[in-house]
Structure formats: structure tokens, C-alpha cells
Amino acid sequence: MKHSLFSRIMALLAVAVIVALIGGVIYCIVTDSEYLMAMMFTAIIVPLIIYLLVWLKKVFSKSADSVDDIKAHEDVPNKDGKEE
């Protein structure tokens, strides 16, 4: 499967955001910040949202591919040469 440049850039951006969030959590732990729970919540939710968006993209692109396959299959004649 060939990935587009856009997909690669978005993946690198997602990794950078996740690393920054983990760094923020560590910073909040070290400095005993009052925002520790907010950073931990964000560090858990952001990767889940990214995963959900990637999963939804795969689901919808597969459904679009299957619709195209069904339409292509409908145009194929039967064994006896008649269309359905």
C-alpha cells in the first residue's frame, strides 16, 4: 500500500503531538503542577481521537470500495450471456 505525502506528514505530526503531551505530563509531575490531571487526560484522549479518526477513514474508504465493487459486478453478464 502506497501512502501519500499528506498521510506521512499527518502521522509525523501526530507522533510529535503525542511526544509533546507525554513531555508535558512529565513536566507537570516534576514541577508538581496543578494541571497534572488535565495533561494526563489530554495525553490519553488525543491518541484515542487520532486512532478513532484513522479507523473511521478506513471504514468509510472500504465501504466506498465495496460499493464500487458491487456496481462493477452488476454490469458483468451471467454465464449464459444474459445480464441480471
Image (tube, rainbow, N blue to C red):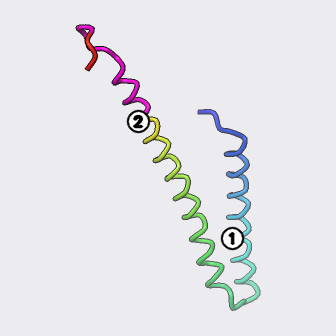
Which amino acid lies under the numbered mark 1 shown in the image of this protein? Ile
Is 12 left, or right, of 68 in this rendering?
right
> How dense is the environment of label 1, judged by Cα within 10 Å: few (below 14), some, or many (20 and up)?
some
Which residue is located at x 66 percent, y 79 percent? 39
Q: Nearer the viewer, residue 76 or 51?
A: 76
Magenta part of the protein: which range? 68-81
Q: Which residue shows up at 68% across the image and 64% down it?
A: 18
Look at the numbered disc 1 and give the secondary structure of its residue.
helix
Kindly report the distance in space between the C-alpha atoms of the residues bearing marks 1 and 2: 41 Å
Look at the numbered disc 2 and give the secondary structure of its residue: helix
Mark number, residue 67: 2
Q: Nearer the viewer, residue 52 or 78?
A: 78
**Front residue of 43 and 83:** 83
Indicate the position of residue 70 as horizontal and vertical percent values. Answer: 37, 30
In magenta segment, residue 69: yes
Residue tagged 1: 22
Can you tell which mark lies on residue 32? none
